[in-house]
Amino acid sequence: MFKGARKDDVKQIASELNLEVNEKNTLWDIIELIKNSEPYKENFDAVKEIAELVIEERKRHEQSQVEIEKLKLELEVAKAQAEIKNTSCEGESQDSLETLIKSVRTLTVKLPTKQDNWGFFFSSLERAFSTKKCPRKVQSGDFIKFTRRKGI
């Protein structure tokens, strides 16, 4: 029932069941509190449905945030491309639409799900930035966005 649940999810489930939870409680403490509660014992199916809804809502929210970040990156790349077109010489070749799309895909790498993969993620991101010759301002802005989203 709590598969894929995070501490915030379990805390929200507990609050939906009118159970008191404080910051010192661990994930397992809160799960045990829920399992020992009257609503859980009396109506397991309702509690299970609440848990599924809470987890599903969090996942939908995270997915929408990822989509928003992708759109922001696409917009930044398009702005940078437009700026390059405005400042470049006529003799220089312009990137095609396919190259631009490929750049956006390269720069919109998936976020790691495990703690151990963050080092690889940031080194890959740094390589992608240097390959695509992104301005330093864009690089630092994206780094700040990633760290805020994950609470690093």
Image: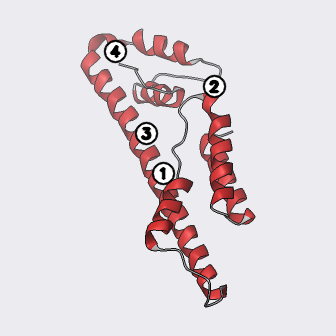
What mark, if any, has residue 58 been given in the picture?
Answer: 3
Closer to the chain start, of discs 2 and 1, is 2
Closer to the chain start, of discs 3 and 1, is 3
Given the image, on which type of amino acid does mark 3 rest? Arg
Q: Residue at x 34, y 15 (%)?
A: 40
In the rendered image, residue 132, in percent from the top left (x then y), is placed at 62, 61
Q: Are marks 3 and 4 in contact (CB under 8 Å)?
A: no
Closer to the chain start, of discs 1 and 4, is 4
Numbered disc 3: secondary structure: helix
Q: Are marks 3 and 2 in contact (CB under 8 Å)?
A: no
In the rendered view, would you say 44 is above or below 124?
above
Q: Residue at x 58, y 68 (%)?
A: 76
User: How dense is the environment of label 1, judged by Cα within 10 Å: few (below 14), some, or many (20 and up)?
Assistant: few
* Quarter where residue 120 is shown: top right
Task: Give the foreground label among 3 and 4.
Answer: 3
Closer to the chain start, of discs 3 and 2, is 2
The residue where tag 2 is placed is 23
Mark 2 → mark 1, Cα distance in angstroms: 26 Å
Mark 3 → mark 4, Cα distance in angstroms: 22 Å
Closer to the chain start, of discs 3 and 4, is 4
* Quarter where residue 29 is shown: top right
Mark 3 → mark 1, Cα distance in angstroms: 11 Å
